[in-house]
Image (tube, helix red, strand yellow):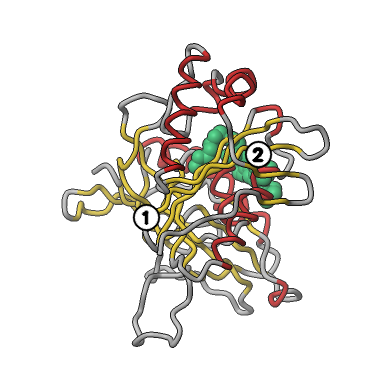
Amino acid sequence: MPLHPPDELLTARLRLRPPTMDDAEAIYAHYATDPQVTRFVVWGPHANVGITRDFLRELLTGRDRGERWPWAIERRADGRLLGMIEVRLHGATADVGYVLERPSWGQGYATEAAHALAEWARSEPGLSRLTALCDVRNPASARVLEKAGLRCEGVRRRAMTHGGTDVLVDVLSYAWVRPLDPPGEPQLLELDHVQLAMPRGGEEQARAFWRNLLGLREVPRPAEMAGRPGLWFERGAVRVHVGVEEDFRPARKAHPALRVTGYDALLARLAAAGHASKPAETLAGARRAHVHDPFGNRVELIDAEG
Ligand SMILES: CC(C)(COP(=O)(O)OP(=O)(O)OC[C@H]1O[C@@H](n2cnc3c(N)ncnc32)[C@H](O)[C@@H]1OP(=O)(O)O)[C@@H](O)C(=O)NCCC(=O)NCCS
């Protein structure tokens, strides 16, 4: 049966409602011309309001055909149109996309809208999978998806164009999946995270390495971990947990191996911070090097463009 999302979704501060052709001027004035806004979406800045009207017409036609379901994001306090969120419907799966005007960034609005949409997805038994693709350079959107309960399944290399250009970019693939009932056959699905050890009191050094140098984000640990020292770092599907080990001894052989872009720049950044790398032989044509974290644990870096 075709899915039929609700016309309206209400959150504490937002009303998600069907867009109309009358929204064209507000969309054009609030965000459609802003290259910062379109940097990580498929379309490029609109050169005139006629393009916004065509865009809306296409959206509404898709909605009439049951292929896509857009909502205008309206602030309840003053009725201002802040942006748009939509699901594209493909049978039992759907993918989500959203955009907000720049002055409204950083106030939790996208999280609120995405959360409402994910709630609808969970309540819709006909929907098995809700996905989103997010540019690897767009951590704000990745965070919105994570907070809405989607999980990064991995990276898709050169899988999309953004900003109205024809340049293919790397995107993170996020999904929420309805649990199987009853559960299926046992399968090892994926690597969830890598656990590394550090000595007591090593938190600041771990942050300097994993967050500042390697660019992972420190994420709050679940309440169940409270009282146990340690840190979690993530970016997309790269998840590194660093825990305190009494009688710590560095892992010089066992190691995580990370595929990276910007390989030379990253090795230079690490060297400048005192983490000189040692090249390893190329494997399957890919350059590799070993570095050590501040505690002497070995980390392998592989050139993803190699
Ligand atoms: C992506 C976008 C929708 C986010 O909207 P928003 O309302 O600012 O998002 P929220 O305020 O709900 O949440 C943003 C989260 O990202 C985090 N964040 C923002 N910038 C970040 C950065 N540079 N690095 C890491 N995290 C960042 C914020 O801290 C916040 O997380 P937190 O609540 O855990 O602190 C908005 O920036 C946008 O419209 N961008 C252009 C269009 C776009 O990229 N759409 C998504 C396509 S997949």
> Is residue 167 among the parts visible in the rendering?
yes
Mark 1 — residue? 90
Instruction: Please give the name of the residue rendered at 44% of the width and 67% of the height, measured from the top-left corner.
Output: 128
- Which mark, by number, is residue 73? 2
Q: Residue at x 62, y 56 (%)?
A: 147
Q: Nearer the viewer, residue 53 or 130?
A: 53
Along the viewing direction, whichever of 266 and 222 lies nearer the viewer: 222
First of labels 1, 2 by sequence position? 2
In three-dimensional space, the C-alpha distance between marks 1 and 2, rounded to whole angstroms, equals 23 Å
> Which type of secondary structure does the marked residue at label 2 adopt?
strand
Image mark for residue 234? none
Instruction: Look at the image and tell me in which quarter the N terminus lies.
Output: bottom left
Where residue 295 appears, as percent x and y from the top left, is 55, 62
Q: x, y (%) of residue 215? A: 53, 46
> Relative to 28, is 97 above or below?
below
Q: Is residue 135 above or below residue 236?
A: above
